[in-house]
Image (spheres, grey):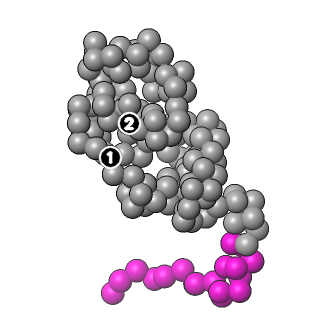
Amino acid sequence: MGHPHKAVPEPSAILQAWTPFKRLIGVTSVNNEEDYAQARATIDTLLDEVGDKEDHPLAEVLDYLANQVKTYEDENFQIPEGKPMEVLRFLMEQHELKQEDLGECAPQSRILDILSGNRSISKEIAKRLVYRFHVRADLFL
């Protein structure tokens, strides 16, 4: 017969929960550069806390914001087709990152090797870059 639904809260009750959440987080939808910067900064903070623990209670908030950011990026940044190292360089420029800012993805020396074309991107590093930049894995492989 279909699954019984949980009772849906009144819109006024949703608003009571949403307004403080929105005020606290500072951005719940990404419509301009300012929202984008705020969302990225919040995501970075959440990433430090959540790491790769998918069952972390804040993982859903992280996913929610990451989706908002991805939608904005899809509409505003066309990622060029190119070699993985060129794509990585492009993303680092877009996000104003240096090699040392990607420490959670790979050692600085490894990033340098990748950018200089001396090394290809391993599956493991590709996975971390995908998570870091919220892009498709095939860009790096």
Write down the region rendered in magenta.
1-18
* Residue 108, x across and y down, in percent: 48, 16
Dot 1 surroundings within 10 Å: few (below 14), some, or many (20 or more)? some
Q: In the figure, 82 relative to 4: above or below? A: above
- The residue positioned 71% from the left and 86% from the top of the image is 12
Secondary structure at badge 1 equals loop
* Residue 41, x across and y down, in percent: 63, 45
Query: Which of disc 2 and disc 1 is earlier in sequence?
Result: 1
State if disc 2 and disc 1 touch (CB < 8 Å). yes
Q: In the figure, 139 relative to 24: above or below? A: above
Magenta run includes residue 112: no
* Residue 16, x across and y down, in percent: 75, 77
Q: Is residue 10 visible?
A: yes
| Closer to us: 17 or 114 | 114
- 133 sits left or right of 39 in the view: left
Dot 2 surroundings within 10 Å: few (below 14), some, or many (20 or more)? some
Q: Quadrant of residue 46?
A: top right
Q: Quadrant of residue 90?
A: top left
Magenta run includes residue 5: yes
- The residue positioned 44% from the left and 21% from the top of the image is 106
- 20 sits left or right of 46 in the view: right
| Amino acid type, label 1 | Ile
Q: In the figure, 24 relative to 8: above or below? A: above
Secondary structure at badge 2 equals helix
| Closer to us: 29 or 80 | 80
| Amino acid type, label 2 | Phe
- The residue positioned 70% from the left and 59% from the top of the image is 26
User: Which residue, given by chain and number where applicable, does mark 1 sit on?
Assistant: 79
In the rendering, which numbered label is found on residue 90?
Answer: 2
- The residue positioned 41% from the left and 38% from the top of the image is 91
